[in-house]
Amino acid sequence: QVRLQESGGGLVQAGGSLRLSCSASGRTFSAVAMGWFRQAPGKEREFVASKRWSGASTYYSDAVKDRFTISRALHGYTVYLQMNSLKPEDTAVYYCAAQQTGANAYNIWGQGTQVTVTS
């Protein structure tokens, strides 16, 4: 069974930084992309950033572009989200997701990690 485990969330003041991590486990797991989504209270889940494993292309939402950076570990399926210049509107539960090889969408999701930014 494949699992995604996030870590690194927490409470930070506006202007601060946090780094989220997400690691995949499962003997036969392989992915074409991994990414981050977030869901704020009362809002729908939204895309934040993603990284493709082949070619290493990265994508960001306009809301986080130039402030957040997605990266991957050299080995295995681990992704990071470096979040700088955080704003109160970045407050949300952040979810890691993976698009397994052969899937046409993100089909594996983590449990989420809370990020709270105070003003």
Image: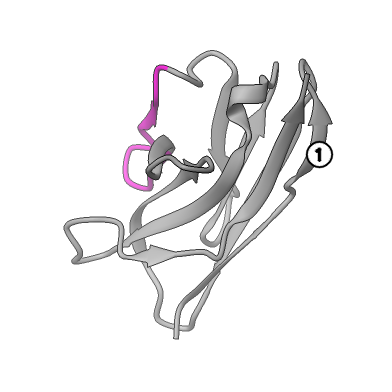
Q: Is residue 25 above or below residue 115?
A: below
Is 23 situated left or right of 18 in this image? left
Looking at the image, residue 66 sits to the left or right of residue 54; the answer is right
Q: Which residues are magenta?
A: 50-62
Quadrant including the C terminus = top right
Whether 51 is among the magenta residues is: yes
The residue depicted at 55 percent of the width and 65 percent of the height is: 111
Q: Tag 1's secondary structure? A: strand
> Which image quarter: residue 80?
top right
Q: Which residue is mark 1?
A: 11
* Residue, far front: 42
Q: From what the image shows, is residue 117 above or below residue 62? A: below
Left or right of 116 on screen, residue 94? left
Residue 26: % across, % down: 49, 80
Camera-side residue of 2 and 86: 86
Residue 74: % across, % down: 58, 49
Three-letter amino acid code at disc 1? Leu
Question: What residue do we see at 52% from left, 40% from top?
Answer: 40
Of the pair 54 and 109, the residue shown nearer to us: 109
Which quadrant of the figure contains the N terminus?
bottom left
Other residues around mark 1 within 10 Å, as few (<14) / some (14–19) / many (≥20): some
Measured along the vertical axis of the image, is residue 108 above or below residue 98? below
Q: Position of residue 45 (x, y in %)?
A: 40, 45
In the rendered image, residue 69, in percent from the top left (x then y), is placed at: 57, 27
Give the image quarter of residue 29.
bottom left
Judging depth in this view, the residue of 30 and 11 nearest the camera is 11
